[in-house]
Image (cartoon, rainbow, N blue to C red):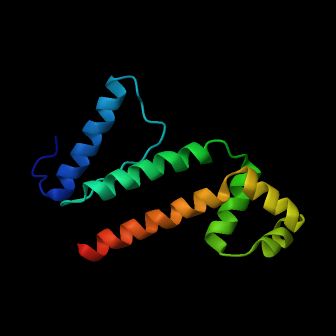
Amino acid sequence: MAIGADGPGYYKAREAIDNLKKLENKKKKALYDIQILINGDNRLQELSLNSIFKLMYSIESHWTSKQREIINYMLFENNNQSIAAQYFGVSQSNIQQILSKSHYYAYEESFCAINSILNEVNYHA
């Protein structure tokens, strides 16, 4: 118990911990380590974000280390497939196959959706 801890952030953190404990008690332990709670009347955004995170984890959990490396490169370096192919020393079609098999495009769309939702919540805060 934190002495003197108070405020909306503290209460949202406590709520998130309680939610995870409830899942654990029901033997529905979460396979992901993130839960977003937002101060105010943002339940739809919370539900959307947490659902997207669950789906993204489901996709990501099946990636090989090579897929993970290429996907992180594509997401965070903002390069196209040709540049990625040069960087990794493979053909562009090989990069395309890796991205398709790893559901990269759905993952990227989810990543963008999370950013949009968080920007909207931040804008209205």
In front of the other: 101 or 32: 101
The front one of 102 and 65 is: 102
Image x and y of residue 3, in percent? 11, 47
Picture coordinates of residue 115, whole percent (x, y): 45, 68
Q: Residue at x 37, y 67 (%)?
A: 118
In the rendered image, residue 73, in percent from the top left (x then y), is placed at 69, 66
> Which residue shows up at 70% across the image and 51% down it?
102
Q: What residue is at 74 percent from the left and 58 percent from the top?
A: 99
Side of 52 relative to 91 (left or right): left
Left/right placement of residue 48 relative to residue 31 reads left
Please name whichever residue, 56 or 16, is drawn nearer the observer in this view of the structure.
56
Q: Is residue 16 above or below residue 69?
A: above
Name the image quarter holding the C terminus.
bottom left
Quadrant assignment for the N terminus = top left
109 displayed left or right of 96: left
Q: Quadrant of residue 116?
A: bottom left
